[in-house]
Amino acid sequence: MKGMEDSQTERKEWLELQRNFRYLAPGGILIYVIPSYRFSDKKIARFLSLQFEDCGILRFSDEDYDDFRQCVFIGKKKKSMHKTVNQKLHDFLLHMDSEEFVANKVTKINHLVGRHQWKVPPGLQRISTFYTKLENKHNFYEGIRNSKGLTGLIERSKPKQLKLGGKPILPLNQGQMALLLASGAINGVIGDGDDLHIVQGLEIVSKKTSDEVHKHENGSKTVVSKTRTHRDVSVKFITPDGLIRKLV
C-alpha cells in the first residue's frame, strides 16, 4: 500500500478494493485497512458508502496510530441490486484527510472490542456435480506426435547450424570478416570438391596512438594524444592442392 511520502503507487488501495470486492459474497464482511487519509479519496469514499452497509470506521489505538497512521473499515456487502449512497458515511470519509478530524471523530479500535459484532455468512455447502472418465494414454500418442506445438518445440530445441553458400556479391569488409570470425564461420573445413578448403581465421587486436593538434586564437597549440583499438583480420587457408596462403 502507499505510504505517507510515496507517490508512485497512489492508486493501489483503490485497485485492491475493486479486486477483493469481486470475490466477496453478498452479505460478506469486508475488513479494509489503509492509511487514514486515503479514505478521503473520492472514488474510495463513494464506493464504500454505496456498496456497503452496517459500516464501522476505526483507527488504530494511540500506541500504534502514530507509527502506522492507518484506519480500519468494516462493512457488510449489500445484497440488493439497487443501491443508494450513504451520504452521512460518504461525507465522513471525505473529511479523513485531516489528522485532527481523525483524532477527534474516529473511534479507537480498542474501544469497540466487545461492543459490536459483524456476522460472517457461511460459505456454499453444495458442491457442483461434475463427470469424468478414464482414458487409455495410448489413445493420445498419435495426436501429440502430430501436434503443431510439439513440432515447434522440437524445431526450437535443435542446435543452430550456421550455413554459408555461394559467393558474396561484394568483397567482405573488415567488420564483416570479424563477424564471421566471431561466429566460427571461417574456421575448419569449408566447401567441397574443387572448392574444399581448410581455413583458420584470427582477429588481431592492437592499440594505435595518434596525435591531434589544436590551434588556439593566441597562436598556441595543444597536442592531444588518443589511443584507439585497432583490429586486423588474418586468415590462413589450405587449398586442395596443398597450397598454404595467408590473407591479412
Image (cartoon, rainbow, N blue to C red):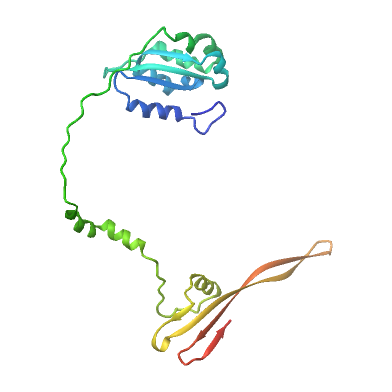
Report if residue 114 is visible in the image. Answer: yes
In the rendered image of this protein, does residue 192 appear above or below residue 122?
below
Q: Quadrant of residue 56?
A: top left
43 or 111: nearer the eye? 111
Residue 69 lies, in percent from the top left, at 54, 20
Q: Which residue is painted at 19% across and 52% down in the image?
A: 137
Report if residue 41 is visible in the image. Answer: no
As drawn, is 101 to the left or to the right of 53? Answer: right
Residue 119 lies, in percent from the top left, at 33, 14
Residue 135 lies, in percent from the top left, at 16, 48
Q: Quadrant of residue 12?
A: top left
Check the picture and name the quadrant holding the C terminus. bottom right
137 or 221: nearer the eye? 137
Q: Quadrant of residue 64?
A: top right
Q: Which residue is painted at 55% across and 74% down in the image?
A: 174
103 or 121: nearer the eye? 121
Name of the residue lying farthest toward the bottom: 241
188 or 84: nearer the eye? 188
In the rendered image of this protein, does residue 39 appear above or below residue 179?
above
In the rendered image of this protein, does residue 113 appear above or below residue 42?
above
| Number of marks present in the image shown | 0
Q: Which residue is painted at 49% across and 91% down in the image?
A: 242
Q: Which residue is painted at 26% across and 58% down in the image?
A: 148
